[in-house]
Image (cartoon, rainbow, N blue to C red):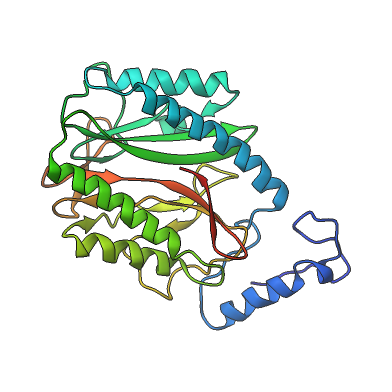
Amino acid sequence: MSNKIGRNDPCWCGSGKKYKKCHEEFDDKISEYEAMGHIVPDHSIIKTPAQIKAIKESCKINIAVLDEVASKIHAGMTTQDIDDIVYKKTIEMGGTPATLGYEEYPKSVCTSINEVVCHGIPSDDVILKDGDIINVDCSTILNGYFSDSSRMFCIGDVSEEKRRLVEVTKEAMEIGLKAVKPWGFLGDMGEAVHEHAVKNGYSVVRQIGGHGVGLEFHEDPWVSYCSKRGEEMLLVPGMIFTIEPMINMGSDKIYTDRKDGWTIYTADKKPSAQWEIMVLVTETGAEVLCY
């Protein structure tokens, strides 16, 4: 990681301090890891205190929107009803749904039921039924800053088999969170997630992962949950990314709906579950910004 900042120049983080008194030692430490052959973040990935503050405001809306969905979701409603809730609450709070119009995605939220892995498109034709499991994936823009998280919901009398999948997936996400440490690696988290899923008899989707987020909807780094400890990008304070493993009851094979170009299904039609949180790497570990 090379930098061209003079030691007496203002630091890139916006603190107003001289670089030598602020982030010079920090950058030198990153450069040492780079010299050892590790993938390291550049300054564009590391959020400044001012940026983190603004991103947290966006997260407040995202959490409130998912809370609103949680209070109203029930069997008999359509996934379009969920989309309406998300749009209304987001706009009321001054935000904008980040998915709406993103690469021509037509709705304000993703609603993925049972064998849908992710990117399910809300519809008046899709009605929640007793026994369904659904992932509601919500993302928000506020004043140009992005937030992103999702939750699973069990609708009515869900089978023990599906309920266990939902619970183990949440456990895997939480175990991954515990593995996020400054000066560790993304692979530390990824392998922890993968181990817990496989230990419980499940598979982890390989082609789709998490991502950096905050200044854009999707930023570097790409986040795998089939990675190895000590590998992938170096974690440093100020990085923000999602932990969002997609865990399947059967095979890890998936496919994309050819008609809508978005909806991703398990190839064997067995259920899939996903929880997503947005985390900030801190000096001591990780802070959950959005859940």
**Does residue 256 appear to the left or right of 137 in the view shown?**
left
- Farthest residue in the bottom direction? 36
Residue at the (31%, 28%) spot, across then down: 121
Give the vertical position of 189 relative to 125 (above or below). Answer: below
Give the vertical position of 232 relative to 94 (above or below). Answer: below
Residue 144 is situated, as x and y percent measured from the top left of the image, at 63, 35
- Quarter of the image for residue 225 reads bottom left
**Closer-to-camera residue (95/101):** 95
Residue 277 is situated, as x and y percent measured from the top left of the image, at 44, 47
Give the vertical position of 8 relative to 101 (above or below). Answer: below
Q: Which image quarter is the N terminus in?
A: bottom right
Residue at the (22%, 24%) spot, across then down: 128
Q: Which image quarter is the C terminus in?
A: top left
Give the vertical position of 20 relative to 86 (above or below). Answer: below
- Farthest residue in the right direction? 8
**Closer-to-camera residue (138/265):** 138
Residue at the (78%, 54%) spot, across then down: 14
Residue 41 is situated, as x and y percent measured from the top left of the image, at 58, 65
**Does residue 153 appear to the left or right of 240 in the view shown?**
left
Residue 111 is situated, as x and y percent measured from the top left of the image, at 31, 31
**Closer-to-camera residue (25/291):** 291
- Quarter of the image for residue 135 reads top left
Asked if one can make out residue 40 in the rendered structure from this viewpoint, the answer is yes
**Does residue 116 appear to the left or right of 220 in the view shown?**
left
Give the number of callouts: 0
Asked if one can make out residue 270 in the rendered structure from this viewpoint, the answer is no
- Farthest residue in the left direction? 268
